[in-house]
Amino acid sequence: MRRTLVLGIGNVLLGDEGVGVHGARALQNERMPEGVTVLDGGTGGFHLLSCFSDFDAIVIIDASLDDLPLGTVRLLEPRYPADFPRTLSAHDIGLRDLVEAAALTGAFPPIRLVAVTIAEDQPLETSLSPEISAAMPRVIAAVHEALSGLQRASGAKVM
């Protein structure tokens, strides 16, 4: 059976920067397809390296700093570490280093990235802004779309 990880990344103490963690927490309350694990990765960095060898595919939810409107949700299919957006949020060096380290070890499963556009300046608070809160249904839908695509690609039954 194909094992897939949904990994929410972010710092919940910095408002919208924690969108990945908020997304993972919301998904933990849903029934996931067989073989799918949801993990709140927080700001785990290299502690998450084993995820790349323990799972056959990974869907990452993370904040993105880009020129798109606040709350834009994109589903990306990065094939190499260099394909990840350069301007992820405050922890982008940790995530990028994590992905590069996984590639160096040969553990680079198919990855889908659900990137959510946030503002550069984030307040010290644990709640999401109204714009990012309003985007959460699109974040969840993008994760489900990514999971369906990964299952189709593997020949697994889509539920």
Image (cartoon, grey):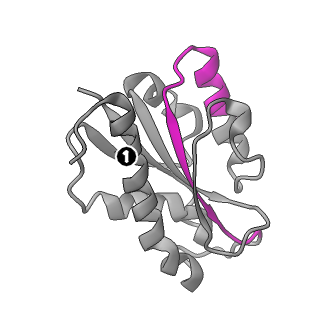
Q: Is residue 12 above or below residue 148?
A: below
Can residue 14 be seen in this snapshot? no
Residue at the image point whose x is 40% and y is 43% from the top = 149
Q: Quadrant of residue 71?
A: bottom right
Percent from the top left, x then y, of residue 138?
46, 69
Q: Residue at x 67, y 69 (%)?
A: 118
Q: Is residue 61 magenta?
A: no
Residue 13 lies, with reference to residue 150, above or below; the image says below
Pick the residue in front: 156 or 125.
Answer: 156
Question: Residue 21: x percent and y percent?
Answer: 47, 58
Residue 83 appears in view: yes
Kindly identify which residue carries mark 1.
Answer: 147
Residue plotted at (74% across, 61% down):
65
Q: Residues within 10 Å of mark 1 (few under 14, many from 20)?
A: many
Q: Which quadrant is the N terminus positioned in?
A: top left
Residue at image location 70% in from the left, 72% down from the top: 122
Q: Residue 144, image x and y in percent? A: 37, 55
In the picture, measured across the screen, residue 89 lies left or right of residue 155, that is right
**As drawn, 106 above or below 71:** above
Which residue range is magenta in the image?
97-120
* Residue 102 on the magenta span: yes
Type of the residue with mark 1: Leu
Quadrant for residue 26, please give it.
bottom left
